[in-house]
Amino acid sequence: MIYFSLFLTSFIAATLFPAASEALLAALVTQDYGVFLLWISATLGNTLGSCVNWWLGKESLRFKEKKWFPVSDTQLKKSQMYFQRYGLLTLLFAWLPIVGDPLTLIAGVMRIRFGLFLILVFLGKGMRYAFVIWLATSIA
């Protein structure tokens, strides 16, 4: 149940809703739980939450033909090309506060290939949680 709670907290933290998955992970690491299971629960939950953001961004393109859609087709294509050329590696930083969650949404809007998105986001979030675990065990 602890692992699922961490998974769920991490999932919610990756959406546009605020949650403190790092604090929960750090607290659990100092107790008698499997560190790998804690790491994988947090990483998978947070990565899947980012996948929801990617999907929402991708689905928002259904409205691009509407007058009220804030970006023209030309601007969108230019932005997609720019993001695919220069912005892909920023997905490694999808864990950052404030900018990380919107970045995963923008990746969906920019039609970043899901497989590539998944790998980059998983790596970045996995490294962040590994650092949290290292820090929590170093301090405790």
Image: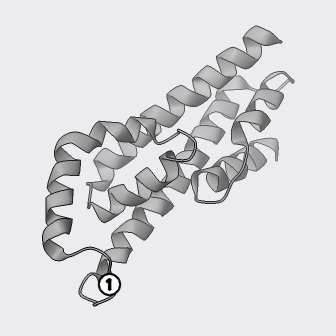
Q: Residue 131: x, y in percent?
A: 60, 21
Kindly identify the residue that appears in the image at 31 percent across and 49 percent down.
115
Location of residue 116 in the rendering, given as x and y in whole percent from the top left corner: 29, 45
Q: Is residue 107 left or right of residue 123?
A: left
At horizontal 71% and vertical 41% (from top left) the residue drawn is 21
Residue 75's place in the image compared with 133, above or below, is below
Looking at the picture, does residue 58 appear above or below residue 24? below
Assign a secondary structure to mark 1: helix
Give the farthest residue toward the right.
Answer: 31
Residue depicted at x 42% and y 53%: 104
Which quadrant of the structure image shows residue 2? top right
Q: Is residue 121 left or right of residue 19?
A: left
Q: Which residue is mark 1?
A: 63
Amino acid identity at mark 1? Phe
Q: Nearer the viewer, residue 72 or 86?
A: 72
Question: Image height check: is 56 above or below 2?
Answer: below
The C terminus is located in which quarter? top right
Kindly give the residue lying farthest to the bottom in the view shown.
67
Measured as percent of width and height from the top left, residue 137 is found at 75, 14
Horizontal and vertical percent position of residue 16 = 59, 59
What is the quadrant of residue 81 in the picture? bottom left
Q: In the drawing, does residue 27 fall left or right of residue 73?
A: right
Given residues 10 and 105, the one toward you in this image is 105
Q: Residue at x 39, y 67 (%)?
A: 57
